[in-house]
Image: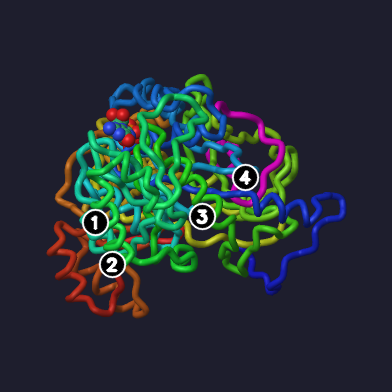
Amino acid sequence: DLPEIDTGTAPEATPTRNAPAAQIAREVQRRRTFGIISHPDAGKTTLTEKLLLFSGAIQLAGTVKARKSGRHATSDWMEIEKQRGISVASSVMQFEYRDHVVNLLDTPGHQDFSEDTYRVLTAVDSALMVIDAAKGVEAQTIKLLNVCRMRNTPIITFMNKMDRETRDPLELLDELESVLDIRCAPVTWPIGMGKTFRGVYHLLRDEIMLFAAGSEKADQAFEVIKGIDNPRLAEMFPLEIEQLKMEVELVHGASHPFDLEAFLAGTQTPVFFGSAINNFGVREILNALLDWAQPPRERDATVRAVAPTEALFSGFVFKIQANMDPAHRDRIAFLRVCSGRFERGMKIKHLRLNREIKVSNVVTFMASSREQVEEAYAGDIIGLPNHGNMQIGDSFSEGELLQFTGIPYFAPDFFRSVRIRNPLKVKQLHKGLQQLGEEGAVQVFKPVQGGELVLGAVGVLQFEVVASRLMNEYGVDAVFEGTSISSARWVSGDDKRVLADFERALGHNVAYDAAGNMAYLATSGVNLKLTQERWPKLTFHATREHA
Ligand code: GDP
C-alpha cells in the first residue's frame, strides 16, 4: 500500500534536469495518440498501412500486411511466440506528419483479441472507428466503442470500402446513431458506390474530390473540383450530380453540423467516406486527427490530476507482453507517458514497489523498427524491460506518490476451469496463475466452494497463451475445460453482512479474483439479471480498477 501524502501540488523540478517548460509544452502540443476501433476485416490493417505511407514511415505498402498474414491461432508455442514478436513490432507505431508526432496504438483483433485490446484504449486520446460500409456496425465495434465511452474519447469515423457495393449511406448514419448512440456529423459525402463510385463531396469545404483507383505510392493527389455548382461537374457526371445535390440538401437538413466541442466530449463523431485500399479519403482523416483531436490532456491520479506539461516525468503501464523475442524470454511493459520528459538512463520510481529503477534499456516504437528511445513526452509510449515485477496499472514517477486511475480490468466473456495432470504441481499452478493474472494475461477466479480455479478471458487465444506459458515458465501441464459460466461481475456493497450472506447463499458462483476482489460468476444472462434483482443492496460491476 502506498503511504498517504497530504500535498496536492507537484514537487518542484530538480535543478539538475534541464527540460525547459516551453520545450515540453511544444512537444506535448505536437502529439496525437490514437487507436483504431473496428470489427475484423473492416480494413484496419490496410488503413494503418496507408497512414504510415503518408508519413513516409514506410516506403512501400505491404509491410504491415505481410506481418499480419503470418498470424493464425495455433497451439504451437513457438508459433505463438513468433506471432507475439511480430505483433509487438506493430503494437505502437510512431510517425511524424505535418510537424506532429503521431502515436498509433494497435488494438489487436482477430484471434489476438484480448483484454489488452480494451485496455489499449485507456491509453489513447482519440480513436478512429473504421466501418465496412457494406456491413455497417458490427459486434466488436460496439464493444470497443463502449470502452471509449468510459473516458469520453473523441472518435473519428471512416466508412470504408466505398469502391464496393455498400449500404445506403444515410442508412449507415442512422445505424451508427441508433446502435452506437452517438451523433453523426458527415464531413464528406459519397457520390455513388462500387463501380459507379465517383468521389466524395466535402460538406465543409464545398469541394469534390474525384475518385481514382489508388496506387501504392505515398504521395497521391486526387483531383479536386471546387463548388458543387461547378459546371464541370455537371458535364462529367450528368447522371449523378442531381442525385448528389438532393442528398446533400437532405444531409444538411437531417444531420448534425460538425461541432468541435461535441466531438471532443465524445458525443458526436465526424464521418468520412472513402476507400482505404485506394488511399482515398485517408489523408482527410489524418488531417482531422491533427486538426480536431486534442493533444494529451490531464490524467486523473489518486492524489491529483496530472497535467502533461508538468516538468516531472510520470506514466502508467497499460499492457504487458511476454516473450516478445523468441531468443529472450523477457517481457515488456508498455508505459504511457503522462507528464514531463523521459530520457534514457534517467531514474524513475516504481511506485507500487517503492523502488527506484534506472531505465537504460527502454524501447520506443518507430513505424519501421523497434528503436532505442532517447526522449519521450506525454502521449508517447515507451517499452520497459520487465522481469516479472510490473503489473497492469502500475504508475511510475520521478518520486511523487501517485496512482493513475482509469486503467480497468474488464469482465471476461469466455471461461475455462483449470485442472492439472500432476497434483504435486498444484503450488506451481497457483503461483503461475497468480503471476499471469497480475500481468493481465488472464483473469483467475477462485470459487468459494468447489476446488477448481476458473479462468476468464476476453478472447480465447488468451487461454492458449496461458497454457503454453504455464508449461514453459512454470512446468505445469494444465488442462482447460469448458464451464457453465457465461459472464462475470465484480460485486461490491457497503454492508458486510449482506456480502457474507451473498457468499453463503451462492457459494458455488461466488469467487475471488487474483487481487482478492469478490466476483459473481453467472451461468446465463437471465441468471445474472435475477441475481442482481434479488440482491439490490449489492452492486455488480463490469469492470474493476487496478487494485
Ligand atoms: P482488418 O482485419 O480490419 O485489419 O482488415 P484488412 O485491412 O486486412 O482488410 C480486410 C480485407 O478488406 C482485405 O482483403 C482488404 O484488401 C480489403 N479492403 C480493405 N480496404 C478496402 C477498400 O477500401 N476497398 C475494398 N474493396 N477492399 C478493401
Asked which colour scheme the image uses, the reply is rainbow
Please name the amino acid that badge 2 sits on. Ala
Q: Secondary structure at mark 1?
A: helix
Q: Of callouts 3 and 2, which one flags the residue occurring earlier in the amino acid sequence?
A: 3
Q: Secondary structure at mark 3?
A: loop
Of the numbered discs in the image, which one, if any, rests on residue 445?
Answer: none
Please name the amino acid that badge 4 sits on. His
Residue 82 against residue 151 in the figure, above or below: above
CB atoms of marks 1 and 2 within 8 Å: yes
Query: Percent position (x, y) of residue 529?
Result: 17, 68
CB atoms of marks 3 and 2 within 8 Å: no
Please name the amino acid that badge 1 sits on. Leu
Q: Nearer the viewer, mark 3 or mark 4?
A: 4
Q: Of callouts 3 and 4, which one flags the residue occurring earlier in the amino acid sequence?
A: 4
Q: Of callouts 1 and 2, which one flags the residue occurring earlier in the amino acid sequence?
A: 1
Q: Which residues make up the magenta segment?
A: 368-389
Residue at x-position 40% and y-position 56%:
203
Q: Where on the image, by quarter, is ligand 1?
A: top left
Q: Of callouts 3 and 1, which one flags the residue occurring earlier in the amino acid sequence?
A: 3
Pointer 1 residue: 170
Q: Quadrant of the N terminus?
A: bottom right
Residue 460 placement: quadrant:
top left
Q: Is residue 509 left or right of residue 456?
A: left
CB atoms of marks 2 and 4 within 8 Å: no
Kindly report the distance in space between the C-alpha atoms of the residues bearing marks 1 and 2. 10 Å
Pointer 2 residue: 254
Of the numbered discs in the image, which one, if any, rests on residue 125?
Answer: 3
Residue 310 against residue 495 in the figure, above or below: above
Judge the density around disc 2: few (<14), some (14-19), many (≥20) Cα neighbours within 10 Å: few
